[in-house]
C-alpha cells in the first residue's frame, strides 16, 4: 500500500562519486542535464533512480545513448537494467525537462514572484532530475546555471560567472535533499564573519529589491550563531561563503541547504514597524537552527528518513540552548515547555501520536512534527541531564569525530553517549521508539526525619503501541522547608522502574517537594496538591521553571473548576497580587505568569482528568477569570502598565522585550474592564508592531476594532507579512459565536491569496486556534476548514496535510462534535484525487 518500513532498509548498491548539473532555466521548460559518476558496489544490481514529473529527453552511459529497452520508466522513477550497466565505474548522463512555473506544490524547482527556488527535503530532488533521492547517498556536486537573471546561486563556493550564467562547486559530499538553486532579481545585504581559525566567510542575505532594509537583524543573528557554535560545540563553518535567501512562498519555516539556506521571508525580514518581539526571537532561533544544521544534519546526516529526529531533535536542542544563552535562560525554557505541551503533548494524546523515531510512513512529509522536533529536543536534553554538561560535550566531540561525513542512525547517536560515558542507555532508547507522554504519579511520606517520594510511571496506549515498558527518566527534585528555605538542592533522581521510591534523610520537618525542576523529563506530573502548596512554591521555589509551573497549575485548575461553575480560587488571585508587587522578578518572567493558559490547554487538561471539555464554557471561564483578575488588581495592573513603558527607540533586545511583554499582559487584563480605552490609545500611538498588534488584538476581543482594522489595513496593504497578521488576529480572536461567518468573509477578501502558504495559515491556522469558534457546536467551523483543505490539497498537498492536524483533538469532545468531525474527515478522505499526503493523514485521524 505504498508504506515504507524502517525494517526494510538496505544500502544503495552504487557509490555516487560526483554529480555535475547544468540548468537552463525557463519558466515552462527548464532543461536539467545531469552527469553522475558512479561505482557499482554490488555486481548485477539494477540502477534504480527516483524521478517524478520529469520528461526524459535523453540518457546515456559513458557517452553511449541508452535505448528504451535498456530501462523502464514509471511515475516514480527509472530503472536501468543490469545488462545495460558496466561493472567498472561509469558516468550516467541524462537530460530532463521540468516546468517550475506550474509547480504549486512548492517542492522541487518552483517559482515564487518571478524568482526560481528549490525545496528538496525530504524527497523533492526527484522532481528535478533522475537520482537516488535518499539521504544516505552523499556526493560532491558542481552546478552550472544558465538564465537571464542577475543573481544565480547554488550550494558551495562560487567558481566562475558571466552575464546569464554562473558555476558553483560544493566540495562537501551531501545528500540530494540539501541541494539548492536560486535565480532571481535579488539584492544582498552583506557582511562577513571571521572564524576561530581566522578564515573570512562572506555572508549574504538575498531579498527582493525594497526589502534590504529589513535584513540587519537576521545578519546579526547569523553572526551570533556562528560564534556560539564555535564556543559551545567547537564547530567552525567550512565554506568561503554563506548565503541566505528569503522567499515568500514556502511550505516550511526554512531549509538548511549546504551554504545556501532558503528561508520563508517571515523568518528573515524584520523592522520595528513590521515585526513583533516574538517575530524577532523566532527569526534569531530559526537562523541559528538552519546554521547549526551545517554540522548536525549536513556534515553528519541521516541514514534514512526514519532517523529525522537525529538531526532535528539535536538541532532544535541546539537552537534552544543558543537562545537561552542570548536571552533569559529560564524564560526561554518556560516558553519552550508551553510550546511543547501545546503542540507535542497534544499530538501524543491523539490519533496522530508517533515515536520520535517512527518505524513506518506513507508520506515522510507528514512526519515533520512536534514529536520529531520538539520531543526529539527534549530527549537530547534528558541525555545531557543524565551524563552532565561535561559528559555531554565529550559525547558530542566523539559524535563529530566518529561520524563526520556519514549518514547515521539513532543507534549511532546513543552509542556515542554509551562509549563516552560508560553508561548503558538501552532502556533510555525507548524515548526514541515509543510514542506517548508518560504520566508520573507522585506520593510522599514523612516519618522519623526521613522523607520518601514514590513515583509511578504509566504511558497510555498510542496507535499501534498498546503496552509500554517503563522508561529511564531523569527527575530533578529539590526540597523546601515550610519556612521557604531550600533544604535539599536540585538532585537528579533516575527512575527506571514502573514504581520506585527515593528517600531523603535528616529532615527535621516535613518538606515541600519541587518535582521535575526545569522540566527534566517530558512527562505529565500527577500529584494531589493543595492550592496553598502551589502558592507556596510560586513564592519560594528556587527553580524558576517550577515557580512558573506552580502558577500555571493553579491557573489551570482554577479555570477547570470555573468551567464547572466554581468561583475563581482565592489562592490564585492572591498569588497574582503578590507577583505583581514583586519587583525582584524579571518582567519577562512575570509576564509569563500573568498570561493565562490557552483554551486548548484547558481542554487538554479537562480531557486528561476525565471531563469532556465544553468549548463555550472554557471560553467563558477564561474571559471571566481575566475580568476578575483585572477588577481585583486594577491598581497594580495599571501601575505595571505605566511603569513598563519602554522609553526611547525600539530595540528587540531581551530586556525591553520583557518589559513590553509584561506591559501587554497587563493591558490584556485591563482591556476587560476599561472599555479598551488604553488599547485604543496605544493603537494610536504605538511606533512598533509589538504594541500595535497587541493593541489591535485587545480591540478585537473587546469588539471595538472595526476602525482600527481598516486603518491597519490601509497602512500595511502592500506589506505581505503584515497583512498576514491582519488576517491572523481576526481569525484567532474574533468572537467564537460568529467566527465561522467572519472567516468566511475574510476568505472572500481579495487579499486572501490562499495559494501562498503563509496567508493560508494566517487565516485557516489562526481560525483553528480560535478554540470555541473552530469547535462551534453546529459544526460550521469544521465544515469551513474541511472545505479549504479539500481546495488546497490538489495544489499544495504538503501544506494541506500539515494543516489537517487541526482535527487531531476530536476524540476529546462530546459525541455530537465527534460525529461532526468524522463527517468532515470522511468527506475529505473521499475527495477525488486526494493526495497521498492528505489521505495518510485522514486515515490516521480517523483511526
Ligand atoms: N530541515 C528543515 C528544518 O527543520 C525543515 N525542512 O530546518
Ligand atoms: Zn531543522
Image: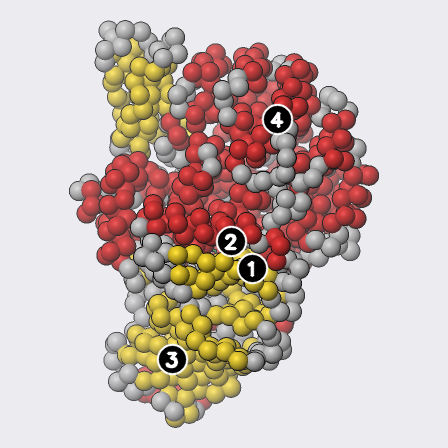
Badge 4 density bin: few <14, some 14–19, many ≥20, Cα 10 Å: some
Residue at 23 percent of width and 56 percent of height: 402
The quarter of the image holding the N terminus is bottom left
Position of 576 with respect to 113 (left or right) is: left
- Which residue lies under the disc numbered 3? 36
> Residue 162: x and y, percent?
53, 80
Are dots 3 and 2 in contact, CB under 8 Å?
no
In three-dimensional space, the C-alpha distance between marks 2 and 1, rounded to whole angstroms, equals 8 Å
Please tell me which residue is depicted at 43% across the width and 46% down the height of the picture. Answer: 319
Q: Nearer the viewer, mark 3 or mark 2?
A: 2
Dot 3, how many residues are within 10 Å of its Cα: few (below 14), some (14-19), or many (20+)? many
Q: Which residue is mark 1?
A: 189
Q: Which residue is mark 4?
A: 644
Residue in the foreground of this view, choosing between 365 and 153:
153
Q: Which is more foreground, mark 1 or mark 3?
A: 1
Q: Is residue 418 visible?
A: yes
User: Where is residue 429 drawn, in percent x and y?
Assistant: 29, 44
Disc 4 secondary structure class: loop
**What whole-number distance in Å separates the C-alpha atoms at marks 3 and 4?**
62 Å
How many marks can you see?
A: 4
List x then y, in percent, for residue 586.
50, 26
Q: Are marks 2 and 1 in contact (CB under 8 Å)?
A: yes
Residue drawn at x 39%, y 8% as measured from the top left: 483
Q: Position of residue 618 (x, y in %)?
A: 63, 27
Whichever of callouts 3 and 4 sits on the residue coming sooner in the sequence is: 3
Between 216 and 792, the one lying in front of the other is 216
If you read the primary sequence from the N terminus, does the residue marked by circle 2 or circle 1 appear first?
1
Amino acid at each position: 500500500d505504498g508504506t515504507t518500513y524502517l525494517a526494510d532498509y538496505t544500502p544503495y548498491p552504487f557509490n555516487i562519486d560526483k554529480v555535475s548539473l547544468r540548468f537552463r532555466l525557463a519558466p515552462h521548460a527548464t532543461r536539467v542535464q545531469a552527469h553522475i559518476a558512479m561505482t557499482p558496489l554490488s555486481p548485477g544490481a539494477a540502477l534504480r533512480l527516483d524521478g517524478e514529473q520529469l520528461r526524459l529527453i535523453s540518457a546515456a552511459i559513458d557517452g553511449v545513448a541508452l535505448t528504451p529497452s535498456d530501462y523502464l520508466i514509471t511515475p516514480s522513477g527509472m530503472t536501468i537494467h543490469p545488462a545495460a550497466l558496466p561493472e567498472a565505474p561509469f558516468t550516467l548522463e541524462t537530460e530532463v525537462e521540468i516546468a517550475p512555473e506550474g509547480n504549486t506544490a512548492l517542492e522541487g524547482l518552483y517559482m515564487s514572484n518571478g524568482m526560481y527556488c528549490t525545496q528538496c527535503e525530504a524527497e523533492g530532488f526527484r522532481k528535478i532530475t533522475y537520482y537516488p533521492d535518499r539521504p544516505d547517498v552523499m556526493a560532491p556536486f558542481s552546478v552550472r546555471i544558465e538564465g537571464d537573471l542577475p543573481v544565480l546561486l547554488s550550494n558551495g563556493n562560487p567558481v566562475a560567472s558571466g552575464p546569464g550564467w554562473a558555476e558553483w562547486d560544493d566540495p562537501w559530499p551531501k545528500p540530494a535533499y540539501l541541494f539548492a538553486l536560486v535565480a532571481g532579481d535579488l539584492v544582498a545585504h552583506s557582511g562577513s564573519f571571521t572564524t576561530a581559525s581566522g578564515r573570512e566567510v562572506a555572508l549574504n542575505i538575498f531579498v527582493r529589491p525594497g526589502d534590504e532594509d529589513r535584513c540587519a537583524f537576521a545578519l546579526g543573528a547569523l553572526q551570533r550563531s556562528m560564534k556560539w557554535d564555535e564556543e559551545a560545540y567547537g564547530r567552525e563553518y567550512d565554506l568561503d561563503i554563506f548565503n541566505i535567501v528569503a522567499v515568500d512562498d514556502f511550505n516550511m519555516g526554512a531549509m538548511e541547504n549546504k551554504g545556501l539556506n532558503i528561508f520563508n521571508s517571515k523568518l528573515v525580514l524584520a523592522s520595528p514597524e513590521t515585526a513583533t518581539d516574538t517575530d524577532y526571537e523566532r527569526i534569531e532561533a530559526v537562523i541559528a537552527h538552519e546554521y547549526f544544521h551545517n554540522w548536525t544534519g549536513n556534515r553528519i546526516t541521516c541514514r534514512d528518513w526514519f532517523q529525522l529526529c537525529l538531526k532535528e531533535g539535536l538541532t532544535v536542542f541546539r537552537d534552544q540552548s543558543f537562545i537561552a544563552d542570548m536571552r533569559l535562560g529560564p524564560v526561554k525554557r518556560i516558553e519552550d515547555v508551553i510550546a511543547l505541551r501545546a503542540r507535542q503533548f497534544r499530538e501524543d494524546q491523539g490519533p496522530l501520536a508517533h515515536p520520535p523515531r517512527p518505524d513506518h510512513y506513507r508520506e515522510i512529509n507528514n512526519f515533520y512534527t512536534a514529536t520529531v522536533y520538539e520531543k526529539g529536543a527534549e530527549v537530547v536534553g534528558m541525555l545531557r541531564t543524565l551524563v552532565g554538561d561535561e559528559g555531554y560535550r565529550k559525547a558530542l566531540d566523539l559524535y563529530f569525530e566518529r561520524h563526520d561525513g556519514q549518514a547515521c542512525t539513532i543507534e549511532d547517536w546513543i552509542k556515542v553517549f554509551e562509549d563516552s560515558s560508560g553508561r548503558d542507555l538501552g532502556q533510555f532508547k525507548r524515548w526514541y521508539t515509543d510514542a506517548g507522554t508518560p504520566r508520573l504519579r507522585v506520593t510522599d511520606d514523612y516519618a522519623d526525619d526521613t522523607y520518601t517520594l514514590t513515583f509511578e510511571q504509566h504511558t497510555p496506549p498510542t496507535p499501534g503501541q498498546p503496552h509500554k515498558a517503563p522508561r529511564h527518566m531523569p527527575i530533578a527534585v529539590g526540597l523546601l522547608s515550610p519556612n521557604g528555605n531550600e533544604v535539599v538542592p536540585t538532585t537528579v533522581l533516575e527512575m527506571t522502574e514502573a514504581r520506585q521510591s527515593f528517600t531523603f534523610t535528616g529532615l527535621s520537618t516535613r518538606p515541600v517537594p519541587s518535582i521535575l525542576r526545569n522540566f527534566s523529563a517530558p512527562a505529565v506530573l500527577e500529584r494531589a496538591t493543595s492550592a496553598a502548596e502551589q502558592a507556596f512554591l510560586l513564592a519560594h521555589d528556587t527553580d524558576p521553571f517550577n515557580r512558573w509551573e506552580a502558577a500555571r497549575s493553579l491557573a489551570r485548575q482554577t479555570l477547570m473548576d470555573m468551567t464547572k461553575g466554581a468561583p475563581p480560587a482565592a489562592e490564585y488571585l492572591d498569588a497574582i497580587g503578590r507577583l505583581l508587587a514583586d519587583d525582584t522578578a524579571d518582567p519577562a518572567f512575570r509576564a509569563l505568569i500573568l498570561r493565562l493558559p490557552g483554551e486548548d490547554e484547558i481542554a487538554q487538561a479537562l480531557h486528561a482528568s476525565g471531563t469532556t471539555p465544553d468549548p463555550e464554557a472554557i471560553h467563558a471561564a477564561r474571559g471571566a477569570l481575566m475580568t476578575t483578575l483585572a477588577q481585583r488588581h486594577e491598581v497594580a495592573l495599571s501601575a505595571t502598565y505605566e511603569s513598563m513603558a519602554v522609553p526611547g527607540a525600539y530595540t528587540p533586545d531581551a530586556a525591553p522585550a520583557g518589559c513590553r511583554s509584561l506591559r501587554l499582559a497587563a493591558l490584556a487584563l485591563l482591556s476587560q474592564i476599561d472599555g479598551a480605552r488604553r488599547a485604543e490609545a496605544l493603537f494610536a500611538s504605538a511606533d512598533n508592531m509589538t504594541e500595535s498588534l497587541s493593541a489591535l488584538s485587545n480591540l478585537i476581543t473587546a469588539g471595538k476594532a472595526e476602525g482600527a482594522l481598516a486603518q491597519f489595513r490601509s497602512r500595511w496593504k502592500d506589506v505581505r507579512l503584515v497583512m498576514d497578521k491582519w488576517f491572523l488576529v481576526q481569525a484567532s480572536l474574533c468572537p467564537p459565536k460568529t467566527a465561522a461567518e467572519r472567516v468566511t468573509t475574510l476568505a472572500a477578501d481579495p487579499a486572501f491569496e490562499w495559494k501562498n502558504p503563509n496567508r493560508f495559515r494566517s487565516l485557516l491556522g489562526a481560525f483553528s486556534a480560535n478554540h470555541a469558534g473552530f469547535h462551534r457546536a453546529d459544526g460550521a467551523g469544521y465544515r469551513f476548514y474541511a472545505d479549504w483543505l479539500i481546495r488546497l490539497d490538489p495544489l499544495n498537498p504538503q501544506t494541506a496535510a500539515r494543516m489537517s492536524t487541526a482535527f487531531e483533538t476530536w476524540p476529546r469532545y462530546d459525541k455530537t462534535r465527534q460525529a461532526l468531525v468524522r463527517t468532515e474527515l470522511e468527506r475529505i478522505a473521499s475527495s477525488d484525487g486526494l493526495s497521498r499526503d492528505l489521505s495518510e493523514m485522514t486515515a490516521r485521524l480517523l483511526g
